[in-house]
Amino acid sequence: MRYKFIQQHTFEFSVVKMCKVLQVSKSGYYKWLSRKPSARVLLNESLVTEIKQIHHQSKRRYGSPRIAKELNMNGIKASKVLVAKLMRANEIRSIIRKKHVVTTDSKHKYPVVENKLNRQFEVKKENEVWVSDLTYVGTKEGWVYLTTIIDLWDRKVIGWALSHTMTAKDTSIAALKMALQNRPLKYKENLLFHSDRGIQYACEEFTSEVNKGKNIDRSMSRKGNCWDNTVAESFFKTLKTELSEHDIKMGRDKFFDLLRENKLLIKPKRFRTKTTCSFHHFNKFEYLIKDLTPKRSNEIWASDITYLWLKKLDKFCYLSMITDLYSRKIVGYCVHDDLSVNGCIDALKMALKQRTNKTENLIHHSDRGVQYCSHAYVKLLQKNNIQISMTQTGDPLENAVAERINKTIKEEFTNDRQINFTNMVEAKTEIKKFIEFYNNKRPHRSIEWLTPTLAHQHQGELKRVWKSYPYKRKVWEDLVEA
């Protein structure tokens, strides 16, 4: 180290004086200077290069244990002790700081189960052990609670739930339903579900949901011992540290984009049912609302159809909705059992009933589906002096508000991204409850944080925060031109 100091300060002090002060011989220094690096030194230098590369690729999140594991996976043998020593010598540090915030309420009356996992985090197959935990994340929309379920086999997040409350229904139960949807348990396949002792995992509601699957066994960490659930804790620690260290504040959608970018999400199963048939002989109308911003309610209505699944009857039913583009209020809807025009007409009649001033100009916008182009539907619109506007291509952004509400129903108000009802009576009852909640209690960023019912009573332009996806539109335009 003394010879190294002399070499680094040659341009500041004379070699003779430094050798005298450090009590080393001048000949010894020059002999060291001409000596070739040893094999160990060369190996350490190459290791430092690899360490820096992995550290940079992990966005400075990885510490010595993870970097050592990554090196060994790449065929480079290095112990955690050596990696830690080299990182200290070269001032390479992880941005993650050791801190623990208690978010688990284990002081409750509900029974807990023993720790059956016992820190055995290495499993041999899929759906052998799932671990779950709950934390909070700051977004631009405020604080939200994130519940995740991770399969220890491949460390994938297979179920998750974002909510503004910490109830079991919105957190642990919602995440469990999504996990079972994404990775269904096979016949006689035994699963161990591990969590902490929080009330969300110990309450009767969650216990009842777990007991529906007779082959699911529960396990809980010991009281106050985060190491018993270290995989789930490590995921949250990494995620929250990266967000706070880089001062990243984002909305809910961008938050999930971050998880998806790092391959931490399972792609949900999609159940696609075609509800739009634009290949017909009926007249199609022009796109009238392009670049048009409504200044009052009942100026532009957007209509669309989506599907609902009836489990007991093993078939689809359909939901037709009409939304006011100014206030985002659902002004008309109908749950119907087929794709005939009757359901759309019933939704339109409901919307017409709430329209007070029938002399004001009103535009009805929809896709080019046969229901909206049919003689009966067009005749009813024309009878009420309503202008007709339709999309020109299959681009969902041309009817974005209606499409967004369909997505909201399937992602925000359900647990598995597919609406499941037992029968038509239940479907109509639950959809009615959802629409009442959506209209009267759910605030929107795009209408100054008002509820749709309150916004419907306003006049004048509301402050809107639009989300734009220019890269998606560019891809679509290129496909159309091709």
Image: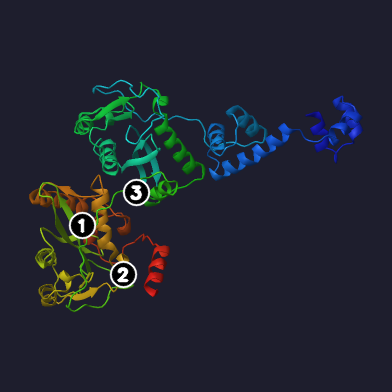
Residue 381 or residue 317, whichever sits in front: 317
Badge 1: how crowded within 10 Å, few (<14), some, or many (20+)? many
Name the front one of labels 2 and 1. 2
In this orientation, which residue lies closer to the viewer: 17 or 211? 211
**Which residue is denoted by mark 1 in the rendering?**
453
Report the number of numbered marks. Answer: 3
In the image, residue 170 sits, relative to residue 359, either above or below, namely: above
271 versus 229 height, above or below: below
Q: Do the residues labelled 2 and 1 touch (CB within 8 Å)?
A: no
- The percent coordinates of residue 150 (x first, y second) are 36, 37
Residue type at mark 3 is Lys
In percent of the image, x 40 and y 23: which residue is there?
Answer: 225
Q: Could you say whether the residue bearing mark 3 is in a helix, strand or loop?
A: loop
Dot 2: element: loop
Q: Is residue 336 left or right of residue 165?
A: left
- Residue labelled with disc 3: 267
Q: Distance between the residues labelled 3 and 1?
A: 35 Å
In the rendered image, the quadrant that contains the N terminus is: top right
- Sequence-wise, the earlier of marks 2 and 1 is 2
Q: What residue type is labelled 1?
A: Thr
Q: In which quarter of the image is the C terminus?
A: bottom left
| Other residues around mark 3 within 10 Å, as few (<14) / some (14–19) / many (≥20) | few
Residue 446 in the image: above or below residue 174: below
Query: Looking at numbered disc 2 in the image, what kind of residue is underneath it?
Result: Thr
Residue placed under numbered mark 2 in the picture: 293
x, y percent for residue 5: 80, 33
Q: Position of residue 459 (x, y in %)?
A: 25, 65
Give the x, y percent position of residue 29: 87, 31
Looking at the image, is mark 3 or mark 1 earlier in the sequence? 3
Which quadrant holds residue 389? Answer: bottom left
> Tag 2: Cα neighbours inside 10 Å, few (<14), some, or many (≥20)?
few
